[in-house]
Amino acid sequence: MRGAAAWQLDLRPGDADSSGTLFISLGGRWRIDQGLPAPETLNDSLDASVRRVRFEAEQLADWDSGLLSFVAGIGRSCTERGIAIDDSGLPPGARRLLAMAAAVPEQRLAGRPVGPQDPFAQVGEATLEFFRGAPQMLAFLGEVVMSLLRLISGRARFRTRDLWLEIEEVGPRALPIVSVISFLVGLILAYLGADQLMLVGAQIFIADLVAIGMVREVGALMTGIIIAGRTGAAFAAQLGTMQVNEEIDAYNVLGISAIDFLVLPRILALMLMVPLLTLYSGFIGMLAGLLVSVTIFDIGVFEYYTETLRALEFKQFAVGLSKGTVYGAMIAFAGCLRGMQCGRSAEAVGHAATSAVVTAILLITIAASIMTIVYYQLGI
């Protein structure tokens, strides 16, 4: 068999000699881009009379992984038939690579399931995954609490510079996106409220709706979701990449607590900045409500301002700030948890970032529901 003067494959005339040895002569350029033959083309030659296969490569001019794949394929066929292999005629480099490939067992990589999966099986797998991950989540929560206690007692070890860098990243640099979303949400609240309040001639209460809604609930919730998608995913990707590069293992070897050094600054930064972003979000939302009220519904600026001051009480700000603080802690917890749980591959980093956002939003929703019920029962 010849491949346009690129590669040559010859079997010794008669296929097998008196000793039952089949000689396979390889010549020319055996490179993967030369349209090499498949190993299965020689299956018919490996009949019952063949007890041994010997490769000869004196005429081999050039080769790459295409040669290795061809020889390995023939080797598998010979193993299935109980035929011995003699590769002493191959180039030394090819023999070393084949030996290395044979010495390493085949790895089964965790990938996506192939084909459709039963919905009930998906629900079952998700449930089992949750219960398997719950102990790890509780253990990580305990480590974070212990780290906070070490911080209070002055024994936590982290760089203050890292804390300020995280504060800058999650605070000032998040202002543009928080401003845009808060302004649009304020517009929506104003229009929705005005549509109903106009029926009874009470457009002035648009100020109450927007002010209380933004300061107490919507500002904190929207800020939390924005920060979860922006910062929570970044935390997971950063720590996940450190897991891939074995940097966190290096911290452990050096006796440095990765929780204190990496997780604690991120949690503190979000707990400090998310409440401030919540206040800023409420202010931007009220400006949007003012714009709609003045330009569309003929409400005076002074009237809107006076009604806003009358509607807002200190407890509204306290509720918004408390929710912002809790949301910030949960976002940091989810991002750092998924980052520390990350596997050691590029795909695992992407999965950790996605999981961090989903976990953070789920925790925020649960916390918002619980806190709203508690504040309502307390009359706050």
Image: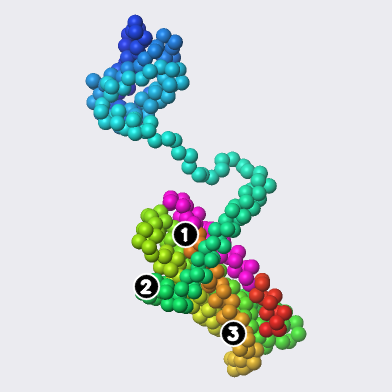
Decide if residue 173 is in sight here.
no
SS class, disc 2:
loop
Circle 2 Cα neighbour tier, 10 Å, few/some/many (<14 / 14–19 / ≥20)? few
The answer to which of marks 2 and 1 sits earlier in the sequence is: 2
On the image, the x and y values in percent for residue 72 come to 38, 27
Circle 1 Cα neighbour tier, 10 Å, few/some/many (<14 / 14–19 / ≥20)? many
On the image, the x and y values in percent for residue 20 come to 36, 9
SS class, disc 1:
helix
| Quadrant hosting residue 359 | bottom right
**Quick one: quadrant of the C terminus?**
bottom right
Q: Rounded to the nearest whole Å, what is the CA distance between mark 3 and mark 2?
A: 32 Å
Q: Rounded to the nearest whole Å, what is the CA distance between mark 2 and mark 1?
A: 19 Å
User: Residue 221, relative to residue 37: is it above or below?
Assistant: below
The circle on residue 340 is: 1
Residue assigned mark 2: 159
**Quick one: quadrant of the N terminus?**
top left
SS class, disc 3:
helix
Q: Nearer the viewer, mark 1 or mark 3?
A: 1
Residue at 47%, 70% (x, y): give it. 147
Circle 3 Cα neighbour tier, 10 Å, few/some/many (<14 / 14–19 / ≥20)? many
On the image, the x and y values in percent for residue 227 come to 51, 70
Residue at 66%, 72% (x, y): give it. 370
Kindly indicate whether the residue at mark 3 contacts the one at mark 1 (C-beta within 8 angstroms). Answer: no
| Quadrant hosting residue 15 | top left
On the image, the x and y values in percent for residue 37 come to 38, 24
Instruction: Please name the amino acid that badge 2 sits on.
Output: Arg
Instruction: Please name the amino acid that badge 1 sits on.
Output: Met
